[in-house]
């Protein structure tokens, strides 16, 4: 399951959503990817968690477990001065290893580099390079 990026300081929701779609597309080459939108109708707990802006690791573990997914990807994008930063975390939802298993980030200094940066961060998260 891939949760849409949280747009932080200096980044609008449309940009965060567009980059989320790029990350989902990139990760689909490594994993079976399900978006939050596609899974929202599965049960009431999922919908309630989504409405509550489930962003912390504990909540995402519960959400992923309720949906039967082993892994959840969550992250954010922010802009400080002229630098964009994208951070992703891979969260295991099952067993004694439940929690964040990997964090990766990338940065760029222009909007024109955001797509490449999002793809690169997703590949790094998946262990692609």
Image (tube, rainbow, N blue to C red):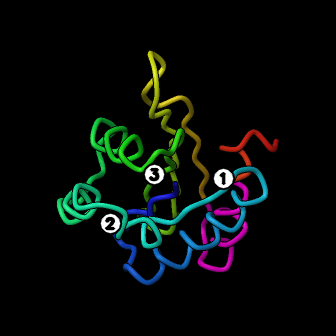
Secondary structure under badge 3? strand
Which residue lies under the disc numbered 1?
Answer: 121
**Which of the two discs, 1 and 3, labels the residue nearer the N terminus?**
3
Name the residue at 64% across, 71% down.
Answer: 22
Nearer the observer, disc 2 or disc 1? 1
Q: x%, y% of residue 121?
A: 66, 52
Is residue 75 covered in magenta? Answer: no
**Mark 3 burial class by Cα count in 10 Å: few <14, some 14-19, many 20+:** many
Which residue lies under the disc numbered 3?
Answer: 74
Contact between marks 3 and 2 (CB within 8 A): the answer is no
Give the prevailing secondary structure in the magenta stretch. Answer: helix
Q: Which mark is residue 68?
A: none
Q: What's the magenta region?
A: 108-120
Residue 129, quarter of picture? top right
Q: Is residue 91 above or below residue 106?
A: above
Contact between marks 2 and 1 (CB within 8 A): the answer is no
**Mark 1 burial class by Cα count in 10 Å: few <14, some 14-19, many 20+:** many
For the residues marked 2 and 1, what is the alpha-carbon distance in whole angstroms? 19 Å
Name the residue at 25% across, 64% down.
Answer: 47
**Which of the two discs, 3 and 2, labels the residue nearer the N terminus?**
2
**Mark 2 burial class by Cα count in 10 Å: few <14, some 14-19, many 20+:** few
Nearer the observer, disc 1 or disc 3? 3
Which residue lies under the disc numbered 2?
Answer: 9
Q: x%, y% of residue 4?
A: 45, 65
């Amino acid at each position: 399951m891939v949760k849409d990026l949280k747009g932080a300081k200096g980044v609008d929701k449309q940009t965060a959503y567009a980059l989320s779609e790029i990350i989902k597309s990139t990760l689909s080459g490594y994993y079976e990817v399900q978006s939050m939108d596609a899974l929202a109708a599965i049960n009431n707990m999922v919908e309630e968690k989504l409405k509550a802006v489930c962003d912390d690791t504990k909540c995402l573990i519960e959400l992923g477990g309720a949906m039967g997914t082993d892994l959840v990807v969550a992250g954010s994008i922010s802009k400080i001065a002229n630098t964009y930063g994208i951070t992703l975390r891979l969260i295991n939802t099952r067993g004694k290893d439940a929690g964040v298993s990997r964090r990766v980030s990338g940065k760029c200094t222009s909007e024109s580099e955001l797509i490449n940066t999002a793809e690169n961060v997703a590949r790094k998260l998946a262990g692609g390079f």
